[in-house]
Amino acid sequence: MAEVTLSIGGRPHRVACRDGEETRVRMLGDMLDTRWTGAAKVSGGSVERAMLFVALMLADDLDEAHRRPPEGAAVSEDALARIADRLESLAAALEHTSSMS
C-alpha cells in the first residue's frame, strides 16, 4: 500500500492508497486545495464548514457533469435555466454564510 501527503489549505494530510494510484490521489487533493481558499473565506474560520463548502462545490461540479449534454450537442433553454438557477442558489448560500460571520 502506498502513501501520499496532500497539502490542503496549507496543512499536510497523509493518505494511504493503492500502489500506482499516487498520481491520481495527488490530483484529487489538488482539486480540494484549489477550492479550499474560497471555501475557507466564507466558512467563518471553521475547518468543518470549509470542507462542507468544498464538498458542495465538487458535488455541484459532478451534478453538472452528469447533466451536461454529449460533446457537440446543443444545450437546451431548459438546461441553461437549470444551470443558472443552481449557480444563483449556490451564490446566495455563500453570500448568506459570509454575512453571518
Image: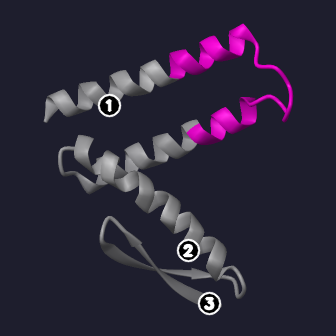
Place residue 11 in its image quadrant: bottom left
Q: Which residue is mark 3?
A: 2
Place residue 14 in its image quadrant: bottom left
Direction left: furthest residue: 101
Q: Position of residue 72 (x, y in %)?
A: 86, 31
**Structural distance between the alpha carbons of marks 1 and 3:** 37 Å
**Structural distance between the alpha carbons of marks 2 and 3:** 12 Å
66 to the left or right of 2: right
Q: Which residue is mark 1?
A: 94
Q: Position of residue 28 (x, y in %)?
A: 57, 64
Q: Which residue is mark 2?
A: 26
Q: Return the disc, 2 or 1, that comes first in the chain's sequence.
A: 2
Q: Position of residue 46 (x, y in %)?
A: 22, 51
Main secondary-structure element of the magenta-colored stretch: helix
Vertical placement of residue 8 versus 45, above or below: below
Vertical placement of residue 54 versus 70, above or below: below
Q: Secondary structure at mark 2?
A: helix
